[in-house]
Image (tube, rainbow, N blue to C red):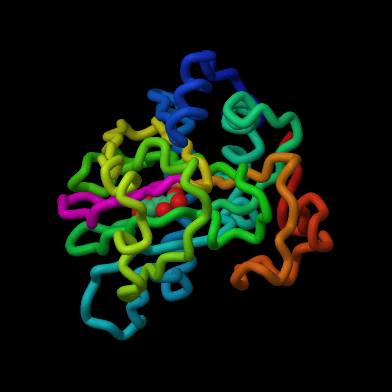
Amino acid sequence: MHTLFASDYRVTDEQVAFFQANGYVSFNGVLSVEELDIVRRGMDTALTERKGLVRDLAGKQDDDERHDRVLQMLNLWESYPEIRAYVFGGRITRMVQRLTGSTTLHLYHDQALVKELGPSAPSPWHQDQPYWPSQEPGMISCWMALDDVTVERGCMQFIAGSHTWGEFEPISFGSEGPALFDLLTDEQKARWNPVAVALKAGSCTFHHGLTFHYTNANTTRQNRRALVTIYIPEEVTYAAEEKMDNPFSDTITSQKGEPLRGTRFPRLA
Ligand SMILES: O=C(O)CCC(=O)C(=O)O
């Protein structure tokens, strides 16, 4: 499996410039059919094995009859060789190096985000950085589609340029938080034009930690499986107690202001 996930995917200067200007960018055909099958196998095994242990970002209880859920499984790389091969293969890491300009990269975590067929929930508009223990912006996510995604199946939607708007309060996934629109300036409201990025399976988007993004509920007859990997560039430091608790708080080894490092944040480059 070691030769898979390793070959280069060319990221052009125009794509780097697009990412820097807009806070997101998309790439087609990043995984081969064989690689896609491997990643799907890892995720499907995890979905079966972790049944009952899967967190629902939409906040429903296990015994809840409703199924409007967003299933989240963290750090599949630690348990599933298929996902480890993907994460450590090198291709996506080098794409992140191009987009961030950072030679050193650590993984923050991976996460499977699954919207099953039938009524799932939307993922509300939010930025990621308020949930992360980082002081500065710069962390970046790769959102890999394992199924073909359209707006109706929950493809990513972005607000271009919103990564320049600074860090907002975290948005609650499960319940109504403060209305986001009340927090935006008139200029930001005028620039609020969501861009939906439909993708074929094996294609991906990258987004900056401050870029506002959203996905619809999956209203189609097929599951929507996405594998997200989150990267820490070298200049990003630990924000310590200033940020909300996160699932990895206990494993962080840095002091406030030092580069963000932890026992579960493996070095990728
Ligand atoms: O896949 C989704 O529904 C949301 C994805 C997301 O919020 C993220 O990758 O940061």
Q: Quadrant of the N terminus?
A: top right
Residue 249 spot, x, y in % from top left = 69, 69
Question: Magenta stretch mostly in which secondary structure?
Answer: loop
Rendered location of residue 267, percent (x, y)? 75, 43
Q: Is residue 144 visible?
A: yes
In the foreground, 215 or 257: 257
Residue ID at (82%, 59%)? 254
Vertical position of residue 117 compared to residue 156: above or below: below
Q: Residue at x 26, y 63 (%)?
A: 121
| Residue 44 visible in this rendered orientation of the protein | no
| 237 versus 157 height, above or below | below
Residue 20 sits above or below residue 260 on the image: above
Q: Which residues are magenta?
A: 211-226
**Magenta stretch containing residue 156, yes or no?**
no
Question: Looking at the rendering, which quadrant does residue 83 occupy?
Answer: top right
Q: Is residue 119 left or right of residue 136?
A: left
Answer above or below: position of 157 versus 167.
above
- Coordinates of residue 209 in the picture (x, y in percent): 53, 47
Q: Answer with the quarter of the image where residue 55 lies.
A: bottom left
Q: Residue 45 location, x and y as percent?
A: 46, 56
- The answer to if 215 sits in the magenta stretch is yes
Q: Residue at x 55, y 46 (%)?
A: 229
**Residue at the spot 47% in from the left edge and 28% down from the top edge:** 21
Q: Which quadrant of the figure contains the C terminus? A: top right
Along the viewing direction, whichever of 251 and 117 lies nearer the viewer: 251
Which residue reaches farthest front? 186
- Comparing 125 with 261, the one in front is 125
